[in-house]
Image: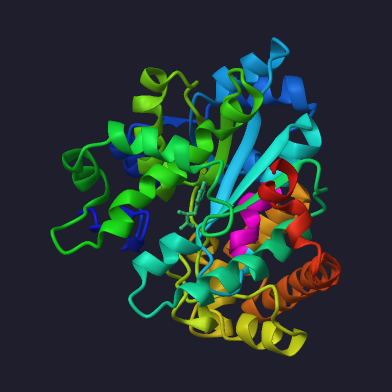
Amino acid sequence: MDEEFVVTPWEVRGRVDYQKLMQQFGARPLTQAEVSLLEKYAGEVHPLIRRGFFYAHRDFDAILKWHGEGKPWALYTGRGPSGPVHIGHMVPWILLKWLFNKFGVEVYFQMTDDEKFYDDPEMRLEEATKWAYENALDVIALGFTPDKLHLIIDTKDIKPLYPIAAKVAKKLTWNTVKATFGFTDSTNIGLIFYPSLQIAVAFLPTELHGRPTPVLIPCAIDQDPYFRLARDIAESLGYPKPATLYSKFIMALTGESKMSASNPNSAIYTIDDEKTIRRKIANAYTGGRPTAEEQRRLGGNPDVCPVYHYHMLFDPDDASVEKIYHSCKSGALLCGECKQMLYEKIRKFVKQHQEAREKARDKVDAYRLSSKLS
Ligand code: TRP
């Protein structure tokens, strides 16, 4: 019997069947054909793609072919700034940075402080905006330069977006957005209008450059409803359809399908200190057995284990990850040692990231699209 699961842009419940979800949404699986095409243009394939963490798409092949014809395109992704960034949020951005390194195209990054304000009854607008600036540090820390990374904070940088959002909003009926996002009669109208803004950024590069400039959007698959609608209306507005590349969700340290912002122990934040990181990893749920004796005899289950999941996400060395997988299954590797290995990897990643993050402070405005247009 299948367990029930629910995925919307605001909620993930139950154990997600990723193949089923992709089919429900109508996205396509990332096959060897697309991966080979990527390899042709990028020279290699990122581990997150090779390992199937990015696993579905819309028109990824089409954008690669477009690139092959020498035509312009851009990258686009975003974040709902509701609190500190955890290392799981960084994963799609790590791929974003890799794609940027390989293709050198412009990157549009939307901070949706308005969305988080509408969505969370407790959230003050000023607080969401503050998080937008804070979270921008984490994006900039990946090594983007202001000429190529265009940051859009919705409540601050609305000017170039608003005319596009108006055109988008006119194409979308209440009936459509209600069915697509599961809105009800008691949903506030901010949230109902909001999809126009997330969709608008997909069309922004075309407006700014005055010629067809499609975007590729790497993000988690829960964002598909926006871009499905964007694709439906693009041509009627004279814009190219956006392409997407979808990841699975990052497992919570508690073993759930997705990290929850409400439980700080379910995630490692990029601002956590070493002691906190050590404690969170030590307390993490694992796919291990109740006793060491049983684990030696029966082996562990890396497939349900967040500790293994993070090795898979943060260790670029295939051989090392495979070794962890098999020695867990065989019972040779116990959870304590495996957690210690993970701690070392995450500690290094976070240390380097925190240094870069502090250097980005006071530089955020230089990345904002508004500061470059005027
Ligand atoms: N809605 C997204 C969130 O809550 C934020 C977002 C805006 C986004 N534009 C995007 C995410 C484009 C991915 C791609 O996190």
Q: Position of residue 54 (x, y in %)?
A: 56, 42
Residue 43 image position (x, y, % from top left): 80, 26
- Check the image and report above or below for 180 versus 278: above
Q: Position of residue 51 (x, y in %)?
A: 62, 44
State the extent of the magenta-drawn residues as a range. 88-95
Describe residue 260's horizontal placement relative to residue 207 as left or right: left
- Give the left or right position of residue 211, taking residue 319 as reference: left
The residue at the far front in this view is 374
Give the residue at the far top of this rendering: 69
Q: Is residue 152 above or below residue 188?
A: above
**How many numbered marks are there?**
0
Which residue is at 47% across, 43% downward? 162
The N terminus, quarter of image: bottom left
Residue 102 in the image: state x and y as whole percent.
Answer: 79, 33
Residue in the picture at 78% in, 51% down? 317
- Colour setting: rainbow
Q: Main secondary structure of the magenta part?
A: helix
Which part of the image, by quadrant, shows the C terminus? Answer: top right
Can residue 28 be seen here?
yes
Q: What is the quadrant of residue 313 in the picture? A: bottom right
Q: Residue furthest left?
A: 185
| Horizontal side of residue 138 vs 19, given as left or right | right
Looking at the picture, tell me which residue is in the foreground, 366 or 116. 366
Quarter of the figure with residue 73: top right
